[in-house]
C-alpha cells in the first residue's frame, strides 16, 4: 500500500499529467468564480475533449478542474454574497458580512488557507480509509441517509436562524425548500406535481436560477439602495495585510480547521448529500466553539471561524466524494457523476478493483486533488488583493455586471425564458425572507436535497415499512440531530448564567 | 486621392461583410457541424443504459458528418418515464436531443402506468444497440437456490426496480402473479443505486439485462434464476419464465413481455424530426456498431453490440399495440403501486 501511495504521487508529476492538471485547474478557477456556472455543467461540456485523452491526461484534467471549483467558489460567496457553487453557501453567512465590514481580504485569506488544509486532510482521510471504505459506505442504507439529510437540515436551521424563533423559522424554511423541490415529476413514477400544466415546470424548478435569485438579487437590491461599495466602511490598511491576517487566523484556530476538515471528509463519503450537508455541519461545529454569549451572537455577523469551518469542509469533502464514486460507482455529486462517466470511457470499472488492482491510480487521484489545491491556493494568494479590491468598487458599477452574470448563469439552466422568471421570482422571495428575518440557507438545502430525501424516505418505507425508525444507526443520527437543535439553547443558558455570575462577582 | 482611398476601404469592408454572411448552403456545411448532441439517459449514472450511452457518445461523432460533440446528461425517475416525457413534450425536434430509455417503456404506456405522458409510437426511433434479454437474479448469499425455494418462501422477497414503466418491474410482477413468488419492490433512480442497495443487503435481488448483470454474476454477488423467452449466449440453460406456469394467460403475457428484450437499449428522438436528419442518425448508428474501437470498449464493458434498426423497432411496437385489449386489461390488474 505504501508503494501505491508514493507511486500515485509520482504519477501526478509526470509532465503530461501535470500539464493537464494545470489546464484543468485554470478552467476550474474560472468556473468556480463565476456564479451559477457550476462545476458539474462545465465538466459535462468538457467530456468531448476528454474522449480524446488518455487516462494519464484525462483524469488529472477532470480532477484538477473539479477539486479547484470548491476553493474558488468561496471567493464569490465572500465577495458578493452570491454562492459560486451550491456547496459554498455556508461561506456566505459569515464571509459576506466580513466583506461588508471591509475585511474581505481577511475572509479570503482564511477561506483559501482553510480550503488548502481541508483538501490535504480530505486527501489524507481518503488514503487512510481505503481499507475500511467499503464497509463504511455499506453501513449507511436508505433510512440512515434520510436521517443524515434531516441532521443537515437541523444543523442549518439552528445556525442560520437568529433570535428566539430562529430554529422554527429555519425548519419551516427547510420544509418550504422541500416543497419547492417537489415541483415537477416525482422520481418514483413520474407523476406531475405542482406543475400547473406548464411544460416548463414539468421538469421542476432548476436549481441555479433559484439559488442565484435567492441570494444574489436581495444583495443587489441592498447594494443599489445603499449606494456604496460592498465594503461599507473603509478598511484599515491594504487589503493584502488583511489576507495575511486571514491566513494567520487559520493557524490560530488550527484545531478547529482540522476538526471541520474531518467532519467534511466523513460526511463527504455519503453519496449525493456530502457536499451540501458537510459545510453546514462544520459551520455548526465552528459556532459551538464560541466561548461566550457575545461570540455566539457574532456568528452570522462576520466571525472568522464561520468562514474557516465551511471553507475547510467543502474541500475535504472533495477527497471523500471520490470514495463512493471509485469504490461503488455511485457518484457523490454531479461532478463525480461526470467523472464516473469518464472512468467507464477510460476503461476503469469502479468497484473493489479500484482499491486493489488499481490502487496506485486511485492514490494518484488523491494526490491530484491535493496538488491542484495547493497550486490554486498559492496562485490565489498572489492575486488576492486585486480580487478583494472588487469590494471597494462603487455598487453602481458592479451591479450591472453581477446582474448580467446571474442572468446568463440562470439562462444556461434550461435555455428558456422560464429560467429568468424563476430567478426573478426567487429573488422576490429572497428579498422578503431577508426583510422578515427568515433564514435562506435552510431553504436552499431543503430545495437541493428534496429529491434525494424523498428517494431515501420512499425506499426506507418500501423496504422496512415503519420499522426503519427503530434501526440503531437511525436512532443515533436522530439523537445527534436533536442534540444539534437543542444544544445551542442549552449552551446559551449556561453561558448567560456564567456571565451573570461573573458580573455579580465582578 | 482621399476619395479613392475611401471608396477602396468601403469596398473592402463590403466584401468582408458579404463573405462572412455567406449562407451555409453555399459552403455546403453538414447539418451537425459545430453542434452539440445531448443524450438524455433516463436513469442515474453508472447503470447499463448509462454506460452504453457514454460509449456511444464517445464513438458516434466519427460517423456523423460534421463531427458534432455529444454529451450525456441524466434525467432519472419513473423508470425513464421522466426522460421520455421530456423528449416527447419539451425537447425540440431538431435532432440535437436523443433519449436513452427503458426497453419496457412501450409496455408501460400500454398498461397506462401513472406518469406516462407520451405515445411511444410517435417517437422518432433512432434504433437500439442490440438484444438485451431480461433475467432475474438474487444475492448469492441468500438461501434460495432454485425457483422452488422462492415459491416456498412466505416472507417478502425485496427486488429493486427503477419504476413501473420498466421491464425490471413488469417481468417480476408476472412471476409474482403466475408463479406465486412473494415479491415486493423498492424503487431507486437507476441500476447503479440498486446494485449498491444489493451490496448493502437492503435488497434481495433485481431483474435486469443480462449484460448489465454479467459482471456481478461473475463476481459471485448475484445468482441468476429465470430468463425471458429471448436468450443470448450464457443464459440458455436458465429456466424460461413461461415454462414455470401452467396458466395460459400467464404464458401469453410473459411471451408478450419478451418483445421489449428485442428492443434492447432503445434510443429515441422527439416526434417530428425531419427524415433527412433521422437518416443521418440511423446511418451513424448502423456504422458505429461496426466500429472496431467501439467494439473494444464494448468488450471492456462486457457489452454485445449490434444494430437494431428503427424499422425493426416499429414492427415490434406495432405487434405490441395490436394485441387484443382484454389481455392488456388482464396485465393492468397486476400493476399496483
Image: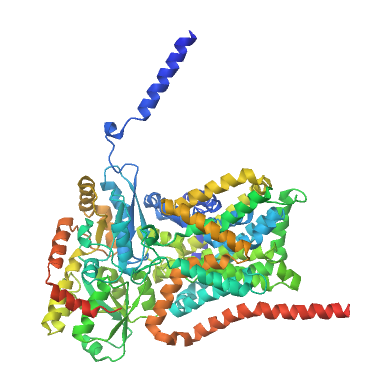
Residue B297: % across, % down = 30, 58
Asked if one can make out residue B264 in the rendered structure from this viewpoint, the answer is: yes
Left or right relative to A252: residue A79: left
The reply to whether residue A127 is visible in this rendering is no
**Eyeballing the image, is A395 above or below A337?**
above
Q: Residue at x 47, y 66 (%)?
A: A180
Identified at 45% across, 66% down, the residue is: A181
Q: Position of residue B335 (x, y in %)?
A: 25, 78
**Location of residue B4 (image quadrant):** top left
Examine the rendered structure and indicate whether residue B292 appears above or below residue B181.
above
Residue A440, x across and y down, in percent: 58, 64
Q: Is residue B9 above or below residue A286?
A: above
Q: Residue B313 vs residue B73: left or right?
A: left
Camera-nearest residue between B258 and B297: B258
Q: Residue pushed farthest right?
A: A506
Quarter of the image for residue B209 reads bottom left
Near-viewer residue (A375 or B286): B286
Q: Please identify the residue farthest to the top as the structure is shown.
A: B1
Amino acid at each position: 500500500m505504501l508503494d501505491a501511495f508514493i507511486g500515485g504521487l509520482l504519477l501526478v508529476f509526470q509532465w503530461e499529467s501535470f500539464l493537464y492538471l494545470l489546464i484543468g485547474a485554470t478552467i476550474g478557477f474560472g468556473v468556480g468564480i463565476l456564479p451559477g456556472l457550476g462545476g458539474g455543467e462545465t465538466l459535462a461540456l468538457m467530456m468531448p475533449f476528454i474522449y480524446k485523452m488518455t487516462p494519464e491526461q484525462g483524469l488529472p484534467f477532470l480532477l484538477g478542474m473539479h477539486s479547484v471549483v470548491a476553493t474558488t467558489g468561496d471567493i464569490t460567496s465572500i465577495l458578493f454574497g452570491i454562492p459560486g457553487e451550491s456547496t459554498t453557501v455556508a461561506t456566505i453567512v459569515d464571509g459576506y458580512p466580513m466583506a461588508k465590514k471591509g475585511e474581505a481580504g481577511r475572509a479570503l485569506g482564511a477561506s483559501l488557507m482553510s480550503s488548502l488544509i481541508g483538501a490535504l486532510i480530505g486527501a489524507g482521510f481518503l488514503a487512510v480509509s481505503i481499507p475500511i471504505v467499503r464497509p463504511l459506505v455499506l453501513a449507511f442504507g436508505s433510512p440512515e441517509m434520510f436521517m443524515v439529510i434531516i441532521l443537515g437540515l437541523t444543523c442549518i436551521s439552528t445556525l442560520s436562524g437568529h433570535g428566539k424563533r430562529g430554529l422554527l423559522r429555519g425548519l419551516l424554511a427547510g420544509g418550504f425548500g422541500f416543497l419547492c423541490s417537489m415541483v415537477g415529476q416525482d422520481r418514483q413514477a413520474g407523476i406531475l406535481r405542482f406543475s400547473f400544466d406548464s411544460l416548463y415546470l414539468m421538469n421542476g424548478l432548476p436549481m441555479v436560477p433559484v439559488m442565484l435569485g435567492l441570494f444574489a438579487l436581495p444583495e443587489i437590491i441592498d447594494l443599489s439602495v445603499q449606494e456604496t461599495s460592498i465594503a461599507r466602511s473603509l478598511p484599515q490598511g491594504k487589503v493584502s495585510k488583511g489576507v495575511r491576517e486571514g491566513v494567520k487566523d487559520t493557524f490560530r484556530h488550527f484545531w478547529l480547521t482540522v476538526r471541520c476538515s474531518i467532519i467534511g471528509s466523513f460526511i463527504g463519503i455519503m453519496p449525493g448529500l456530502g457536499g451540501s450537508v458537510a459545510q453546514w455541519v462544520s459551520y455548526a461545529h465552528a459556532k459551538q466553539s464560541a466561548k461566550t454569549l457575545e461570540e455566539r451572537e457574532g456568528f452570522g455577523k462576520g466571525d472568522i471561524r464561520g468562514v474557516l469551518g465551511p471553507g475547510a469542509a467543502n474541500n475535504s469533502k472533495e477527497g471523500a466524494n471520490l470514495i463512493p464514486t471509485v469504490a461503488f460507482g455511485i457518484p457523490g455529486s454531479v461532478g463525480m457523476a461526470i467523472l464516473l462517466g469518464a472512468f467507464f470511457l477510460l476503461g476503469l470499472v469502479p468497484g473493489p478493483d479500484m482499491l486493489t488492482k488499481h490502487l496506485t491510480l486511485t492514490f494518484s487521484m488523491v494526490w491530484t486533488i491535493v496538488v491542484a489545491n495547493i497550486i490554486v491556493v498559492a496562485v490565489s494568494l498572489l492575486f488576492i488583493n486585486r480580487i478583494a479590491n472588487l469590494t471597494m468598487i462603487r455598487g453602481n458599477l458592479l451591479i450591472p455586471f453581477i446582474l448580467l452574470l446571474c442572468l446568463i448563469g440562470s439562462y444556461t439552466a434550461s435555455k428558456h425564458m422560464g429560467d429568468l422568471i424563476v430567478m426573478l421570482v426567487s429573488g422576490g422571495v429572497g428579498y422578503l425572507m431577508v426583510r422578515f428575518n427568515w433564514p435562506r440557507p435552510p431553504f436552499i438545502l431543503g430545495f437541493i436535497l428534496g429529491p434525494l430525501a424523498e428517494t431515501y424516505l420512499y425506499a426506507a418505507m418500501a423496504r422496512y415499512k415503519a420499522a426503519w425508525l427503530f434501526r440503531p444507526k437511525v436512532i443515533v443520527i436522530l439523537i445527534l440531530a436533536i442534540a444539534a437543535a437543542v444544544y445551542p439553547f442549552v449552551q446559551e443558558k449556561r453561558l448567560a448564567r456564567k456571565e451573570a455570575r461573573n458580573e455579580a462577582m465582578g | 486621392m482621399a476619395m479613392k482611398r475611401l471608396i477602396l476601404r468601403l469596398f473592402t469592408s463590403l466584401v468582408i461583410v458579404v463573405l462572412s454572411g455567406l449562407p451555409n448552403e453555399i459552403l455546403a456545411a453538414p447539418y451537425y457541424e459545430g453542434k452539440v448532441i445531448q443524450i438524455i439517459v433516463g436513469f442515474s449514472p453508472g447503470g447499463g443504459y448509462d454506460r452504453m450511452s457514454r460509449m456511444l457518445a464517445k464513438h458516434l461523432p466519427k460517423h456523423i458528418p460534421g463531427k458534432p460533440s455529444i454529451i450525456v446528461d441524466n434525467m432519472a425517475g419513473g423508470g425513464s418515464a421522466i426522460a421520455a416525457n421530456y423528449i416527447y413534450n419539451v425537447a425540440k425536434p431538431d435532432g440535437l436531443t436523443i433519449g436513452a430509455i427503458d426497453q419496457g417503456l412501450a409496455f408501460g404506456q400500454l398498461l397506462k402506468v401513472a406518469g406516462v405522458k407520451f405515445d411511444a409510437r410517435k417517437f422518432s426511433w433512432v434504433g437500439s444497440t442490440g438484444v438485451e434479454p431480461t433475467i432475474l437474479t438474487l444475492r448469492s448469499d441468500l438461501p434460495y437456490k432454485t425457483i422452488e425455494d422462492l415459491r416456498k418462501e412466505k416472507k417478502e422477497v425485496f427486488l429493486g426496480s427503477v419504476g413501473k414503466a420498466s421491464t425490471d418491474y413488469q417481468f417480476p410482477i408476472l412471476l409474482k402473479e403466475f408463479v406465486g413468488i412473494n415479491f415486493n419492490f423498492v424503487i431507486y433512480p437507476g441500476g447503479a443505486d440498486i446494485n449498491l442497495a444489493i451490496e448493502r443487503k437492503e435488497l434481495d435481488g433485481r431483474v435486469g439485462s443480462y449484460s448489465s448483470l454479467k459482471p456481478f454474476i461473475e463476481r459471485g454477488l448475484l445468482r441468476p434464476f429465470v430468463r425471458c423467452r429471448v436468450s443470448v449466449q450464457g443464459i440458455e440453460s436458465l429456466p424460461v419464465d413461461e415454462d414455470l406456469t401452467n396458466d395460459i394467460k400467464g404464458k401469453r403475457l410473459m411471451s408478450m413481455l419478451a418483445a421489449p428484450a428485442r428492443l434492447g437499449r432503445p434510443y429515441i428522438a422527439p416526434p417530428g424530426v425531419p427524415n433527412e436528419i433521422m437518416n443521418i442518425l440511423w446511418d451513424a448508428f448502423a456504422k458505429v456498431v461496426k466500429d472496431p474501437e467501439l467494439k473494444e470498449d464494448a468488450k471492456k464493458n462486457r457489452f454485445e453490440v449490434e444494430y437494431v434498426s428503427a424499422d425493426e423497432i416499429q414492427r415490434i411496437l406495432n405487434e405490441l399495440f395490436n394485441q387484443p385489449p382484454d389481455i392488456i386489461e388482464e396485465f393492468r390488474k397486476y400493476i399496483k403501486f
